[in-house]
Image (spheres, rainbow, N blue to C red):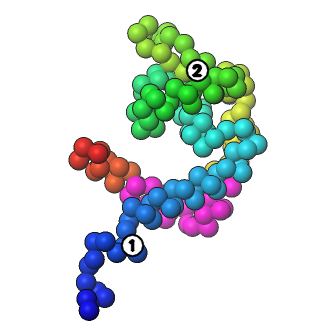
């Protein structure tokens, strides 16, 4: 019989990947009721957050920031455009590039979204410094995996 302290790479309870996967799904589920009032999905909300920080961003830069390919990003942007929250048009700075711009409705939605981060923070019931540390570790893992070719 193996020692309980012996490392078993196939032991379910030691899988970091599943904890990350489960926590990610739970976080997105926590956002769902908060985002219903904005009529946004989680990824649409992420796009809007980026545009609220920087109105006018190239579609390629947005894809890099969100780690999404154009096959995932294009339908997402079409839905936001159909909701009249964003405009996709040729960049004013580089006509070879398409950029995203907030509409008046898109800018106004920011006011309604202000309470969401606080509501999510309350749902996690974790100290803010622990959440920031968790984000830092996840960012480091993403970078490490990206550099390894994943």
Furthest toward the bottom, the residue is: 1
Q: What stretch is highlighted in magenta?
A: 119-138
Residue at (60, 36) in percent of width and height? 44
Q: Which residue is drawn at 24% across and 43% down?
A: 149
Q: Give residue 140's position: percent from left, percent from top.
A: 34, 53
In the picture, residue 48 is in which quadrant?
top right
Residue indicated by mark 2: 101
Quick check: 68 above or below 96? Answer: below
Helix or strand or loop: what does disc 2 sit on?
A: strand
Q: Is the magenta stretch mostly helix, strand or loop?
A: helix
Could you tell whether 90 is left or right of 137 in the image?
right
In the picture as drawn, the residue positioned furthest to the left comes out as: 148
Compared with 71, 94 (above or below) is above
**Residue closest to the eye, 82 or 87:** 82
x%, y% of residue 107?
68, 28
Q: In this view, does 142 lie above or below 80?
A: below
């Amino acid at each position: 019989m193996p020692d309980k302290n012996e490392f078993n790479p196939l032991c379910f309870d030691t899988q970091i990947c599943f904890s990350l996967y489960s926590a990610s799904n739970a976080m997105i589920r926590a956002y769902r009721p908060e985002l219903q009032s904005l009529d946004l999905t989680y990824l649409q909300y992420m796009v809007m957050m980026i545009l609220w920080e920087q109105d006018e961003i190239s579609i390629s830069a947005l894809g890099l920031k969100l780690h999404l390919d154009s096959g995932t990003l294009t339908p997402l942007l079409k839905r936001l455009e159909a909701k009249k929250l964003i405009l996709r048009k040729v960049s004013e700075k580089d006509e070879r590039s398409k950029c995203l711009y907030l509409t008046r409705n898109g800018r106004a939605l920011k006011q309604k979204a202000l309470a969401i981060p606080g509501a999510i923070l309350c749902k996690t019931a974790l100290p803010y410094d622990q959440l920031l540390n968790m984000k830092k570790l996840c960012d480091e893992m993403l970078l490490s995996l990206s550099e390894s070719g994943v």
